[in-house]
Amino acid sequence: MKSYVSKAEMEELGEGLIKHYAGSSKEPLRCVDIEGFITEYLGLTIEYVSLAESDKDKIGFVSDGRYPLKVFQDGAVIERVFPVNTIVLDRLLLRAYDSGRRRFTMAHEAAHIIFERINPEPVACFHRIYDTEQTYDVAELAKRFNFEETQASAMAAVLLMPQFLVEQALRVFNGGRRLPIYGSGVLHPREKVIIQKMADSMGVSFTALVIRLRGFGMLNYHPLEEYMEKEIRQGGIRRAD
């Protein structure tokens, strides 16, 4: 049976776990050490391999100790069963520019383990990337956006961006003030710079942080017309003069 964890439960549990893990640290927490949380707090192993699965968007895997995984080894493709409680990540995630995606993938797989400990039912789970250029049939979409994967991604966001950490970043980079947004999604370049600084300090993507800011009510909504009038129409007139 699927174990449903509400958004409120997820927020409280995820934030509580990170606070509990970071509690012994002498330094103020600015960015979640997700790798340390996984290995030191959850007691899991992380292993990087060159995945050889035919589905190239499989980038992360949490092993149940039974399901074989195809990997490249010594120039050949072999099937390898990893020990239970092992998070297997594609070696390509070690690239410097993939830091954000690597951290999210680790958090996503950690979420699977957390949910499995809440409702013990070991299952091998892949984390996939979604290719916006590829056409997926209904069955493939169901696999990518099924219940467990959606919950794991939501928990990953909580683990990397708990509310107390987002609030702290907002205080540091914007004095704790809500950030203006126009219409439903238009940001002034000034606010984009602030959000990017916040995201960089937390080791997350710009887009992921905007979603959390929106969810926490940290965006101050203004009519789109206000932006168009002040920043485009009037701004254009001033430049023309």
Image (cartoon, rainbow, N blue to C red):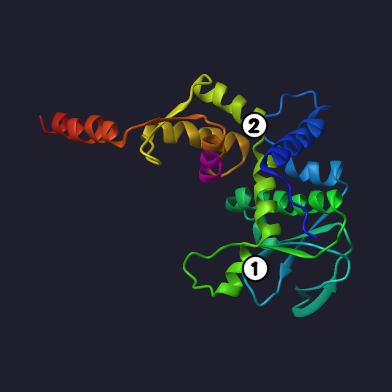
Question: Which label number is shown at residue 163?
Answer: 2
Q: Quadrant of residue 80?
A: bottom right
Question: Which label number is shown at residue 11?
Answer: none
Q: Residue at x 62, y 65 (%)?
A: 144
- Neighbourhood count class around disc 2 (C-alpha, 10 Å): few under 14, some 14–19, many 20 upward: some
Question: Which label number is shown at residue 143?
Answer: 1
Q: Is 89 located above or below residue 186 in the figure?
A: below
- Which element is circle 1 on? helix
Of the pair 37 and 212, the residue shown nearer to us? 212
Residue interval drawn in magenta: 206-211
Amino acid type, callout 2? Gln
Disc 2 from disc 1: Cα separation: 30 Å
- Neighbourhood count class around disc 1 (C-alpha, 10 Å): few under 14, some 14–19, many 20 upward: few
Q: Is 92 located above or below residue 212 in the figure?
A: below
Amino acid type, callout 1? Lys
User: Position of 173 compared to 100: left or right?
Assistant: left
Where's residue 134, x and y in %? 49, 71
